[in-house]
Image (spheres, helix red, strand yellow):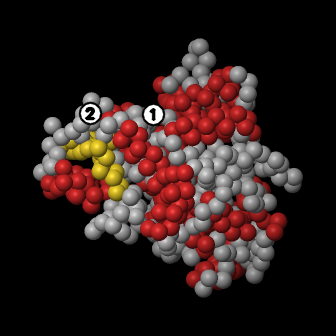
Amino acid sequence: MRRLLVFFRDQLNRSAPLLKDTDPEQDVCVLTEHTAPDTTEHVQKRVYVVAAQRYFRDALRNQGFTVHYEACTDPVEQAGPLAQLRRALHEHTPDAVHATKPGSLAQQQGLEHVCNEANVPLTFHNDTHFLCDHDTFATWVEGRTSPTLEYFYREQRRAYNCLLTDDGDPVGGSWNYDKDNRASFGADGPGLLPEPPSYLDDPYVQKAIADVEQAYPDAPGRLTEPFPWPVTPEQAQEALDRFIEERLPTFGTHQDAMWTGRPWLSHSQLSPALNLKLLDPHKVIEAAEAAYHSGHAPLNAVEGFIRQILGWREFIRGLYWHRATEWSAMNELDATEPLPEFYWTGNTHMACLHDALTQVVDHAYGHHIQRLMVTGLFGLLYGINPQALNDWHEAFYIDAWPWASVPNMLGMSQYADGGYVGTKPYTASGKYISRMSNYCSGCRYDPGKATGADACPFTTLYWDFLDRHEDTLSGNRRMNFQLANLRRKEDTERTAIAERASQLRSLVHNGKL
């Protein structure tokens, strides 16, 4: 019985159940570097994925598999994984198609359609890379109108006996040390911190650079050093070891802080390897927990890091699939502004956005607060169409895949889901950015002002956002304090803020902000 084993670009797990009980002499693995013709993607993300795919391809061939592989420089009549599958079905005439459950509803439905069209049975295998399967999450979320990370995270800690005492209580007495992890750097900045490893000289990366430049000459973004993205499981393990040894001890306290020209700080940069399935999240968690028990890293750093992986990452994936058919229509606040051009270039006078966006242009990366409270916050306050903002996020960030991006951007960041992922819009004025970074010290705009030519656009748009959505948000008790402050403003001040907000929109439309 011949089977086609289909792999998407983010499914490079060499231990996937899909590869068990196979017959390399008959079964054919199917994998392509080509994306659909209308796909826009950061050049660095393309290089990263192509290099990792080629290592995966060669590992399969070393196991004796025939790999039906299409490189990005190979000419094809129609590009993309589904087009490749049609060609493979015609060439190999398999008895069945097998695939790991994809990371997006569109991919799943596409596979089902192509296989139905060819009258070939399709079997999906569970993605055992993740630490909470679909059935377990569905049972947990059933009946919850507003699922909360904290309660899910505690169940995950119990399920994996993670950071627990012998009595099953959380070590240190608390489940969550987030309150200890919100400090800014202060005037002296972050100081010297170890740089992440670089894989730019890897021969597969170098070949991928040449091929991507040939196949996608107009891809946005830049290729810059250090290229800290591991493209093999061995490199991913090295990156994990380096993070645990060098940066985990300083990760916790300042994990929300930002600093001009410092993209890496104490963050791990492991999410791209995790999301390509080059790195086992269970091993990541075990390494971090061991660092706490050995005294190498403090509890607030270890717990905060583990919560991102065992908690948030699994929570977001579960929510994506729980409402998979609904996300594409979500726009609770009727946000319709087009994505400003500076999101692709970083060319703006706003120092915080210039630094955060230029960093993405250079590295295809930003840490969670830069995404939520700078690039995402501007989108929320300004009123960018949330679907357009998510499309940009998936295209431009090296770790962004639909299951991870959609709930984070549409839910947590843009409140397009009406409060399902986050119970309130994550709104703030420029004063938050000033408190958590040094961005404002060199900016032409004043975070303390909402009106006038030198008023911070974030501050102006913050009050304008509350004004425009006052009726919608008045039923949310978590917004009471912010709305009460809005209502203390005189009508003349609210009118002036609205006028300045209108001026800002004109400046954005004309590329002058």
Q: What percent of the width, then of the height, locates residue 444?
A: 79, 75
Residue drawn at 78 percent across, 45 percent down? 193
Front label number (1 vs 2): 2
Image quadrant occupied by the C terminus? bottom right
Residue drawn at 66 percent across, 57 percent down? 225
Question: How many other residues sit within 10 Å of disc 1, few (<14), some (14-19) or many (≥20)?
Answer: some
Question: Mark 1 sits on what residue?
Answer: 131
Q: What percent of the width, then of the height, locates residue 263?
A: 69, 55
Question: How many other residues sit within 10 Å of disc 2, few (<14), some (14-19) or many (≥20)?
Answer: some
Relative depth, front residue between 95 and 357: 95
Residue 251 visible in the displayed image: yes
Inspect the image, locate mark 2, and give the three-letter code of the amino acid beneath it. Thr
Q: What percent of the width, then of the height, locates residue 155?
A: 49, 29
Image quadrant occupied by the N terminus? top left
Relative depth, front residue between 148 and 436: 436
Question: Mark 2 sits on what residue?
Answer: 22
Inspect the image, locate mark 1, and give the three-letter code of the amino acid beneath it. Leu
Q: Is residue 401 above or below residue 349?
A: above
State which quadrant residue 469 falls in.
bottom right
CB atoms of marks 1 and 2 within 8 Å: no
- Secondary structure at badge 1 equals loop
Q: What percent of the width, then of the height, locates residue 305?
A: 62, 38
- For this view, does 133 lie left or right of residue 447? left
- Secondary structure at badge 2 equals loop
Residue 407 visible in the displayed image: no
The tag on residue 478 is: none
| Residue with the most extreme left position | 119
Residue drawn at 56 percent across, 40 percent down? 236
